[in-house]
Amino acid sequence: MSALSELYREIALCQQCEIAKYRINVVPGEGAEDADIMFIGEAPGWHEDQQGRPFVGPAGLYLDELLASINLKREQVYIANVIKCRPQGNRDPLPAEIHNCRKWLERQIELIRPKMIATLGRYSMAMFFPGKSISKIHGTAQKRDNTIYYAMYHPAAALHQQSLRQTIEEDMLKIPSLLAQAEIMTEAKQQPQQLTMF
Ligand code: URA
């Protein structure tokens, strides 16, 4: 069993939060185990809870379109959420739920080791850009520890607010050049290691 499948098995057994009792399916995340980019949303909604897969409702269809705009398919990226169970009535995740679920996301990041992490919406942004405001930092990237962190609006927000549609679409179009930079960063990091072999 791959380390990621083992992690999914552990996540499925988690009953730390009250919402675990009401879920139909846990929604750990999905995508390429060696993805260069990981997208992190907020929490599963109704559709995701039904299917046990992230971003499969209207926001997910829009995310697929956004990915297609940069010639990516969802199978080529990794998609996860801050919390893995659906909050009832699609309420916002509670601080305790975010805290309890954080370990799972951290382990996903450790296993996938993406070159770039794109946060979708306020909740995942808060994990990687604490204290920042999404209206100020969306479409901007920060390089830390050899990873590029990139803040974006949530696709559901853009679906509900026409004015954000153009913004999220423009922000998505910046990803390929950031990924190319991430590639250069990775190569530069590997260079001294290769040299020490001789
Ligand atoms: N919204 C999210 O944040 N995540 C999903 O998986 C679906 C909708």
Image: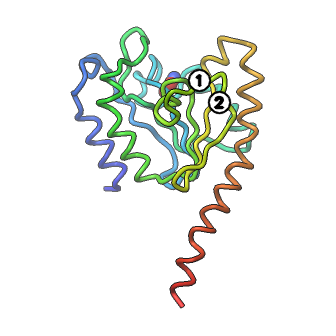
Identify which residue is drawn at 69% across, 55% down: 181
At which x and y percent is residue 119? Answer: 56, 34
Q: Nearer the viewer, residue 7 or 166?
A: 166
The answer as to whether callout 1 falls within 8 Å of ligand 1 is no
Q: How many labels does the image show?
A: 2
Which corner quadrant holds the N terminus? Answer: bottom left
Tag 2, which secondary structure?
helix
Q: What residue type is labelled 2?
A: Ile
Locate residue 53: give its quadrant.
Answer: top left
Note whether residue 76 is visible. Answer: no
Q: Which amino acid does label 1 sit on?
A: Ser
Which corner quadrant holds the C terminus? Answer: bottom right
Measure how far apart labels 1 and 2 are at the Cα level: 6 Å
Find disc 1 in the rendering and name its residue.
133
Say few, some or many: other residues with alpha carbon within 10 Å of mark 2 (under 14 / 14 to 19 / 20 or more): some
Residue at the top extreme, as displayed: 89
Would residue 191 appear left or right of 21 to someone viewing this image?
Answer: right
Find disc 2 in the rendering and name its residue.
137
Q: Are marks 1 and 2 in contact (CB under 8 Å)?
A: yes
Identify which residue is drawn at 60% across, 19% down: 156
Tag 1, which secondary structure?
loop
In this rendering, the answer to whether 40 lies above or below 134 is below
In this rendering, the answer to whether 75 lies above or below 166 is below
At which x and y percent is residue 57? Answer: 54, 21
At which x and y percent is residue 98? Answer: 36, 27
The answer as to whether callout 2 falls within 8 Å of ligand 1 is no
